[in-house]
Structure formats: structure tokens, C-alpha cells
Amino acid sequence: MSNVEQRLRKLASGARFGKFASVGVIGAVFDTTTLVILTELVGLSAAIANVLSIETAILVMFVVNDRWTFAEAGGNDARSLGRRLLKSHLVRAGGSSVQYAIFVLVFYNVAVDLSLFDLDLWLVVVKGGSIACAMVINYIFESLFTWRIHE
């Protein structure tokens, strides 16, 4: 079996992807909640709050993925943990950039009045869509580069 075939087979693991998607839901909840709190309660612009909410989600998802989804991968010492955290941030930069770009482009250029109890639900809808797009990118690159599932 070629190296490419081995990597594709590992990526196609339904159980691992299910765990990753479950962790993604947790991250999406933290991401969206942080975004709503920072925009609606604190008063930050959606663009600035989005950066902070993405970072919050990245940290939460890293911890859960490290302890559950990819628990068998990597060492338990502080150096290994730090290396994976750094790699995770570098790898997620691609997905985070896609998420941020989609969010800003759609939120600021497509005007939809979708409010409920003075809460801007359009913010939540756009955030959810941008998270879904980034999830696919993040799964592939996290699997191959952060946790190196093919080894």
C-alpha cells in the first residue's frame, strides 16, 4: 500500500472523524458563544470578536482532541504537548483563515435582518457556516501534521 493510500485510509476512519466532529461541535459552541458575548454584551466589533472566539475554540478543541480523539498519538511530556499545541495552531491557521475570511465577507457584505430578542441571529448563522467550511480543512491537516495518524 502506498504512503498516499495509507494516509487516505487513516483519514477515512469514521470513528476518528466522528470524534473530531463531536469535538468540533464543542468548539463551535465555545466559538459562537464567545462571539455573541463579545459582540452583543461587550460591544466589540464582529471582526475583532471573531478572532478571539476562534482562539478560544482552538484551545478548547486542542485539549479535547489531545485527550480523546488522538489520545494514542504523541508523548505525554510537557515538551511533546507544547510541540503539538504549536503545530495545532500552525495547522489550524489555514482553517482559521478560511473561517475568518468567509465570516467577514458574508457577515459584512450580505445584509440579512435576522433577530430574536435583540440578538443578531445572522451573526450565529454566518458563524456556523464558516465553522463548517473550516472543519474539513482542520480535520485533514490536524490528522496528518499535528497527530500524524499515518505513522
Image (cartoon, rainbow, N blue to C red):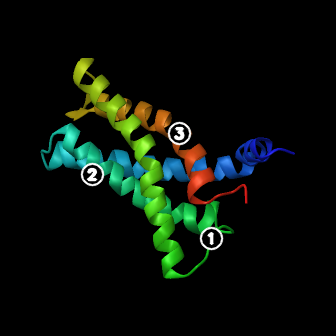
| Pointers 2 and 1 in contact (C-beta within 8 Å) | no
Task: Report, in whole angstroms, how far the alpha carbon at label 2 lies from the one at label 3.
Answer: 20 Å
Secondary structure of residue under mark 2: helix
Whether 59 is drawn above or below 49: the answer is below
The tag on residue 137 is 3
Could you tell which of marks 3 and 1 lies nearer the N-terminus? 1
Camera-nearest label, 2 or 3:
3
Whether 47 is drawn above or below 93: the answer is above
Instruction: Quadrant for residue 117, please give it.
Output: top left
**Residue drawn at (48%, 50%) of the image:** 91
Q: Amino acid at mark 2?
A: Leu
Residue extending furthest toward the left: 43
Task: Report, in whole angstroms, how far the alpha carbon at label 3 lies from the one at label 1.
Answer: 21 Å
Q: Amino acid at mark 1?
A: Gly
Whether 38 is drawn above or below 87: the answer is above
The tag on residue 52 is 2
Instruction: Quadrant for residue 108, please give it.
Output: top left
The image shows residue 82 at horizontal and vertical percentages of 46, 72
Q: Is residue 151 left or right of residue 45?
A: right
- Quadrant of image for the C terminus: bottom right
The image shows residue 126 at horizontal and vertical percentages of 36, 29
Secondary structure of residue under mark 1: loop
| Pointers 3 and 1 in contact (C-beta within 8 Å) | no
